[in-house]
Image: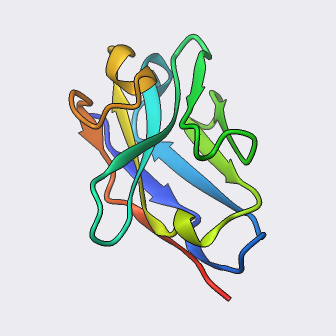
Amino acid sequence: QLQLVESGGGLVQPGGSLRLTCAGSRSDFNLYAIGWFRQAPGKEREGVSCTSSGDTKKYADSVKGRFTIARDEAKNEVYLQMNNLKREDTAVYYCAADLQETSCLDLLTEGLEVWGRGTLVTVSS
């Protein structure tokens, strides 16, 4: 089964940047739609961004213009470049994968087959 590993989280000041990486364990990783989701303390998990296998991309309104999702097919990795970070971006960020792109592109937490364990992003001064 495909496994996902997130990395790149950490502590950053408001206005700063981070790049998260989601690494896939299998060569068919690029057939999957890959999404980034986050869960802040005391809140439900929410969708942040998704890229389909056909390079269709979707962003939550709260991150449009600040976050960029990209895929490196040669490395079996998907990145989330986060710029102009705000305190409200503080959360555990998860990547998730599914061969069906609908749930991912709708930024729905239900219906995605594979999840990573998450990486913590803390935005604080």
Name the image quarter holding residue 28.
Answer: top left
The answer to whether residue 106 is above or below residue 97 is above
Left or right relative to 101: residue 56: right
Q: Quadrant of the C terminus?
A: bottom right
Residue 14, position as x, y percentages in the image: 72, 75
Picture residue at 51% right of the left edge, 19% below the top: 52
The answer to whether residue 13 is above or below residue 1 is below
Left or right relative to 72: residue 89: left
Name the image quarter holding residue 10.
Answer: bottom right
Picture residue at 31% right of the left edge, 51% below the top: 45
Figure label count:
0
Rendered image coloring scheme: rainbow
Picture residue at 36% right of the left edge, 39% below the top: 96
Residue 109, position as x, y percentages in the image: 28, 37
Asked whether 37 or 71 is in front, the reply is: 37
Q: Quadrant of the N terminus?
A: top left
Left or right relative to 69: residue 28: left
Picture residue at 50% right of the left edge, 47% below the top: 22
Q: Residue furthest top?
A: 54
Residue 33, position as x, y percentages in the image: 44, 23
Asked whether 66 or 76 is in front, the reply is: 66
Asked whether 56 or 25 is in front, the reply is: 56
Residue 98, position as x, y percentages in the image: 32, 25
